[in-house]
Amino acid sequence: MSLFFDHQLALLNQSFATKEEALQKLSEELRKKQCVTDDFYQNIIRREEVFPTGLAINGIGVAIPHTDSQYVNESQVAFMSLKKPLPFIEMGTNDKEIDVSLLFMLALKEPHEQLEMLQQLIEMFQKPGVLEELLTLTTETEYLAIIKKYGLH
């Protein structure tokens, strides 16, 4: 298993009232594994306000929240699927909301890893059926199998 996924952080079928609560939960999971600093969550929120990360791909909303590498101790990607979508602002806009059901939170130590991981994730998202598979996951094992199948590293 790749280093970015070795902590196997996958929270499936979660329910939250706001995107901030969902982001806080993922940040907390990363913090518990000592992958990020205590300031990570606040900086995820700050960055999301300025550079939103929502994407609509084939009718499915995905968000890829991330922040600066100075708040990261160890590179890791945390995943969350939501029972009920939450509104996120679409990437490249400052007011267009999209309903997001899948979150991939990037905690990357090296700045160059950010662009590489974003490219790999978007490539994976564009493959037919992948997002639908991610939406219907019931186990962490299924999630890790998808990550491995699409060669994320």
Image: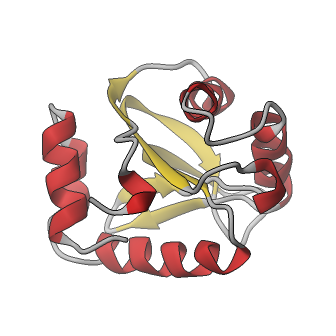
Instruction: From the top left corner, tell me how far across and down residue 76 is, in percent.
Output: 52, 52
In this rendering, does residue 68 appear at all?
A: no
Colouring style: secondary structure
Answer left or right for 151 relative to 119: left
Q: In terms of depth relative to the viewer, which is nearer, 53 or 43?
A: 43
The N terminus appears in which quarter of the rendering?
bottom left
- In this rendering, the answer to whether 92 lies above or below 56 is below
Q: In terms of depth relative to the viewer, which is nearer, 27 or 136?
A: 27
Q: Residue at x 24, y 44 (%)?
A: 135
Q: Quadrant of residue 79?
A: top left
In this rendering, does residue 74 appear at all?
A: yes
Q: Residue at x 21, y 36 (%)?
A: 140
- In this rendering, the answer to whether 138 lies above or below 88 is above
Q: Residue at x 16, y 74 (%)?
A: 128
- In this rendering, the answer to whether 122 lies above or below 23 is below
Total label count?
Answer: 0
The C terminus appears in which quarter of the rendering?
bottom left
Answer left or right for 31 relative to 1: right
Answer left or right for 34 relative to 3: right
